[in-house]
Amino acid sequence: MLDFKPISLDDRNNIEKYFNFLEEPFCDFSFGNLFFWSVVENTNIAFYDDFLFIRFSDDEYFYYAFPIGSGEIKNAINLILKDAKLNNKKIKFVCLNKNQAKILKENSEEKIIINKNRDAFDYIYSLEKLASLSGRKYHSKKNHFNSFKNKYNFKFELINEENIFQCISFAREWYSENEATSTLIREQKALECAFENYFKLNLIGAIIKVENKIIAFCIGEEMYNKNIFCTHFEKADYNFQGAYTAINKLFSEFLIGNFKLVNREDDAGVEGLRKAKLSYHPEILLEKYYAEFEN
């Protein structure tokens, strides 16, 4: 039987050693992401038989990641099915790559339906391209940045112990001025947890100030694949035209010395966000699948 428990900061080393078995750099599987989204996704973990098991939940479902590790996969899947049955929960497998979906289907005694989850595809970009904005594809982006640079006397800073509280205040103001959709409510709770544990999680972020007032910020972390950075949160004041372009470009310039790629996560099915992310021409659209049992 799997002994699930809530994820904690103390679990970091035990969790991250299993990340070496991951096949794809999904944003879902950075420690920070698992930890601060746990406040809304009820994230629990278990270690058994050379596997890391990750489970999210709501009132109706248990959502399981594909077991991460080197044990016997059929046995691991059966343990998950028993866990859901014991707790009287419906079950879905989430954050699957194509190969994992195939393995799941081959090793389940019950009929499984596999679905491609376009809303969850990760957008992975070349940091060099985001930093330079060179070429015809990025012409309008570069114009936006140059316009911002010429219009405002701005300052770019990394988030530190001196400015983090100002950044928290800006974030709260941003959410208060935008429609409180269920997505944004959940996101704000996760962001508050990220701020609260910012230095313990080794997060890396930056701000842009205009006249000593924060008008944009972004926060992320190094992924288990050392060549990839993952940007988790990014917000800017819409009153400052080009602020989103500026924080993206300037932060990419900062990161480029240590990373080659940046995972800027998914678009959650939001049309405007999808259009914006596609406009930066990702190198990779990282496909994800989910699986559920046929009734």
Image (spheres, rainbow, N blue to C red):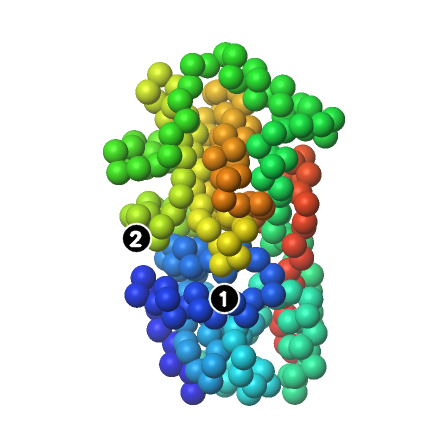
User: Which residue extends farthest right?
Assistant: 136
Q: Is residue 135 above or below residue 82?
A: above
Instruction: Find numbered disc 1 in the image and state the secondary structure of the residue it sits on.
Output: helix
Q: Residue 167: which numbered mark, if any?
A: none
Residue at 60% x, 37% y is 128
Q: Residue 200: which numbered mark, if any?
A: 2
Residue at 50% x, 12% y is 151
Residue picked out by circle 1: 19
Coordinates of residue 256 in the picture (x, y in percent):
53, 39
| Quadrant including the C terminus | bottom right
How many circles with numbers are drawn on the protein?
2
| Quadrant including the N terminus | bottom left
Q: Is residue 198 above or below residue 88?
A: above
Coordinates of residue 174 in the picture (x, y in percent):
40, 32
Residues at marks 1 and 2, CA–CA distance in whole angstroms: 19 Å
Q: Quadrant of residue 32?
A: bottom left
CB under 8 Å between discs 1 and 2 = no
Q: Can I make out residue 276 in this image?
A: no
Q: Amino acid at mark 2?
A: Lys
Coordinates of residue 18 in the picture (x, y in percent):
47, 70
Instruction: Find numbered disc 2 in the image and state the secondary structure of the residue it sits on.
Output: loop
Residue 258 relative to residue 192: left or right: right
User: Which mark is first along the chain, 2 or 1?
Assistant: 1
Coordinates of residue 221 in the picture (x, y in percent):
44, 49
**Around disc 1, counting alpha carbons within 10 Å, would you say few (fewer than 14), some (14 to 19), or many (20 or more)?**
many
Q: Amino acid at mark 1?
A: Phe
